[in-house]
Image (cartoon, rainbow, N blue to C red):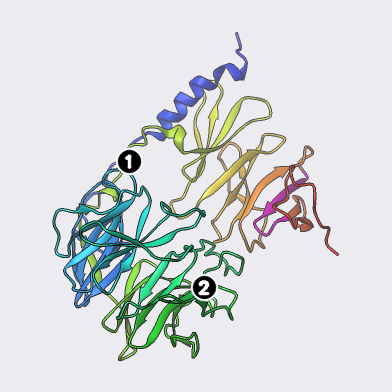
């Protein structure tokens, strides 16, 4: 007796779970215990740099070398800032669950909780030794405010309705700040209404906008020796700049391209910052900009092979073959087909650790699978043999932004798809000619977006 395919999917899912839970043996040999890592959120004081890697805080010499782990909690510790006297490090952590502010000796020790705001992010220190952090706890707006807290827990809410990042002059009378938190559109240079700008607030006066002459992002203000240092994308990539306290005489200091400068921190004439996976130091006196050669001494548990215990949590797409005989699954960036009958075989259609595959669908005749691949470095549509035998065929070649949502016409001759530029495309699967047929001016083209503008 032949059962209907829909009655078999529960057993098929079990087969998929088994397939995706297969353990891959560890590589032979022992890799070195010391190796490069991915470093974020650095802070510097004297010759000490504290940063985040593997979700923990580490300490290393400004000259580089093997870093020493300071924290071990399963939650993340980040946004470290060393106090003006160099004795204490403040940071945001998840020890009790919510993200709050903690402090501990810069050489390590028992962390002490400073806030109970459930969302508090360290922004630095005040000149008189109080932790400066941002929080929404005291705000009537959906934006953060800056708060200073001393060792006894006494808080001062800075008299600014919106403030996310800040740096004081040494006398504590002037604050350079951004009203808004980081704008996350990093793939393109953002110039919209939530782009950050740097403001100046003199105690008792109205705040003054300093970077309003530039439509992009100016953030991460740092004051030292009569100048304001900051991060901006004025040359197409986030780099370090300087200006005078009135927002004039803007000067570019670093020349990175591609990877943005992030999480800059200044102390005693040196700026430490993240660029790519590395930490760099810019010496403002000599203009030398160098990578800090850091290695981690760790068991690198996150790099070990491991079992996927709940594979369905990784499932991102599923499609049933037109005749109901099989299904194609996209999971963990790979593509598999599973038969409706338990006696059939599981086929890995596409899988490469250097490539991400997504949105796999059957063609109308069931003989091919259409999916998106990053094999060329861009997101392009490819056609794969439905039985896994044979070479794939690239369908599109001119991607400039992320492509999504490919739909094949019932006759198998056309592929409609859209992209992140809010454009709708129609690909002739026979000639490979890809034509833009519409562009939305209000959201991405879809079945729920009726307003489109035709080219011309």
Most common SS among magenta residues? strand
119 lies above or below 367 = below
Q: Residue at x 61, y 66 (%)?
A: 192
How much space separates mark 2 and mark 1, taking CA atoms? 49 Å
What element does badge 1 sit on? loop
Judged from the image, the secondary structure of the residue bearing numbered disc 2 is: loop
Q: Which residues are magenta?
A: 413-423
Q: Position of residue 416 (x, y in %)?
A: 74, 48
Q: Is residue 271 left or right of residue 65?
A: right
Whether 115 is drawn above or below 219: the answer is: above
Quadrant showing the N terminus: top right
**Residue 24 bears which disc, if any?**
1
Q: Nearer the viewer, residue 127 or 298?
A: 127
Q: Most extreme residue toward the right, as rendered?
A: 456
Query: Residue farthest to the top?
Result: 1
Which of the pair 46/331 is nearer the observer? 46
> Could you tell me if residue 343 is visible in this image?
no
Quarter of image, res 306: top left
Say which quarter of the image contains residue 380: bottom right
- Most extreme residue toward the front, as rendered? 204
Q: Nearer the viewer, mark 2 or mark 1?
A: 2
Residue picked out by circle 2: 197
Q: Is residue 254 magenta?
A: no
Q: Can you say whether 237 is above or below 52 in the image?
A: below
Confirm whether the magenta stretch covers residue 420.
Answer: yes
């Amino acid at each position: 007796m032949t059962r209907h395919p829909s009655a078999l999917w529960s057993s098929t899912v079990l087969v998929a779970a088994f397939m995706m839970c297969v353990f891959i043996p560890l590589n032979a040999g022992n890799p070195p215990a010391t190796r490069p890592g991915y470093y974020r959120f650095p802070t510097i004081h004297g010759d000490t740099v504290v940063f985040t890697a593997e979700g923990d805080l580490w300490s290393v010499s400004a000259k580089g070398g093997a870093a020493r782990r300071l924290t071990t909690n399963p939650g993340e510790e980040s946004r470290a800032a060393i106090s003006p006297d160099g004795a204490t490090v403040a940071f945001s952590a998840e020890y009790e669950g919510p993200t709050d502010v903690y402090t501990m000796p810069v050489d390590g020790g028992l962390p002490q909780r400073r806030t109970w705001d459930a969302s508090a992010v360290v922004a630095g220190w005040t000149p008189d030794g109080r932790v400066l952090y941002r929080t929404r706890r005291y705000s009537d707006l959906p934006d953060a405010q800056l708060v200073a807290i001393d060792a006894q827990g006494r808080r001062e809410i800075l008299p600014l309705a919106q403030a996310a990042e800040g740096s004081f002059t040494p006398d504590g009378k002037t604050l350079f700040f951004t009203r808004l938190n980081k704008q996350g559109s990093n793939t393109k240079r953002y110039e919209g209404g939530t782009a950050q700008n740097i403001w100046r607030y003199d105690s008792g006066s109205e705040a003054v906008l300093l970077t309003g002459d530039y439509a992009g992002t100016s953030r991460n203000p740092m004051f030292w020796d009569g100048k304001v240092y900051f991060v901006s994308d004025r040359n197409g990539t986030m780099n370090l700049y300087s200006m005078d306290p009135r927002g004039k005489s803007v000067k570019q200091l670093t020349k990175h391209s591609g990877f943005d400068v992030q999480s800059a921190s200044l102390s005693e004439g040196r700026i430490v910052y993240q660029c790519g996976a590395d930490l760099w130091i810019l010496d403002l006196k000599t203009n030398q900009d160098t990578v800090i050669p850091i290695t981690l001494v760790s068991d690198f548990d996150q790099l070990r092979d491991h079992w996927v215990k709940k594979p369905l949590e990784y499932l991102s797409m599923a499609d049933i073959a037109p005749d109901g005989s099989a299904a194609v699954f996209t999971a963990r960036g790979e593509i598999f087909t599973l038969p409706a009958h338990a006696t059939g075989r599981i086929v890995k259609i596409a899988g490469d650790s250097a490539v991400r595959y997504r949105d796999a669908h059957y063609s109308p005749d069931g003989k091919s699978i259409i999916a998106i691949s990053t094999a060329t470095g861009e997101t392009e549509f490819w056609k794969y043999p439905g039985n896994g035998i044979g070479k794939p065929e690239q369908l599109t070649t001119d991607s400039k932004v992320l492509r999504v949502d490919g739909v094949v016409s019932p006759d198998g001759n056309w592929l409609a798809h859209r992209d992140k530029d809010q454009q709708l495309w129609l690909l002739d699967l026979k000639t490979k000619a890809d034509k833009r047929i519409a562009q939305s001016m209000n959201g991405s083209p879809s079945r729920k977006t009726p307003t489109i503008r035709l080219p011309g």
